[in-house]
Amino acid sequence: MSGTESVDSTWKLSNEEGGALAGRWWKWALSAPDDRSPVKDTTGEHAAWNQPDDLWFLAGTYGGRVVRRCAIPSDRPVFGGFNRSSQHLDHGGVRWGDRQGGRRR
């Protein structure tokens, strides 16, 4: 992806690239049918729905707390939506900006 750089396993985005990715994320999140919506999903079952080939989108929520589990390909950077509260991923999963994906450490 142009406009990105990796420094010490951190995915750095330019303002332009971040805006473009946010637009792609919204298009992805809002285009899912209700019965397969990663945003409405409470388990992670629909996390892989229509994922792009160049990165992995993590769904936010429409509010409230949810715990989801999913497998993220190790070769994809992660970009995710947020609600007003922060999202936390357990130590066995991926950390924001970690280009290693869901590989356990």
Image (cartoon, grey):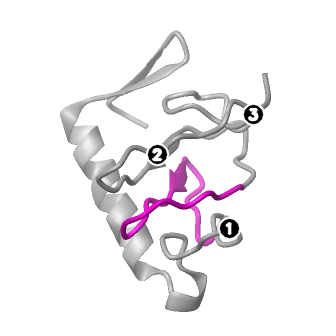
- Percent x, y of residue 101: 66, 36
- Percent x, y of residue 87: 46, 45
Tag shown at residue 92: 3
In the rendered image, which residue does mark 2 sit on?
Answer: 87
Q: Amino acid at mark 2?
A: Gln
Instruction: Give the CA separation, mark 2 to mark 1.
Output: 15 Å
| Residue at x 66%, y 65% (from the top left corner) | 48
Outermost left residue? 15
| Residue at x 27%, y 50% (from the top left corner) | 20
| Residue at x 71%, y 70% (from the top left corner) | 45
Mark 2 or 3, nearer chain start: 2
Magenta span: 49-69
Main structural element of the magenta stretch: helix, strand or loop? loop
Residue 82 in the image: above or below residue 95: below
The question of residue 36 being in magenta is answered with no
Residue 104 in the image: above or below residue 41: above
Mark 2 or 1, nearer chain start: 1
Quadrant for the C terminus, please: top right
Q: Residues within 10 Å of mark 1 (few under 14, many from 20)?
A: few
In the rendered image, which residue does mark 1 sit on?
Answer: 43
Residue 87 in the image: above or below residue 44: above
Mark 1 or 3, nearer chain start: 1
Tell me which corner region of the image, top left, top right, bottom left or bottom right, holds residue 69: bottom right
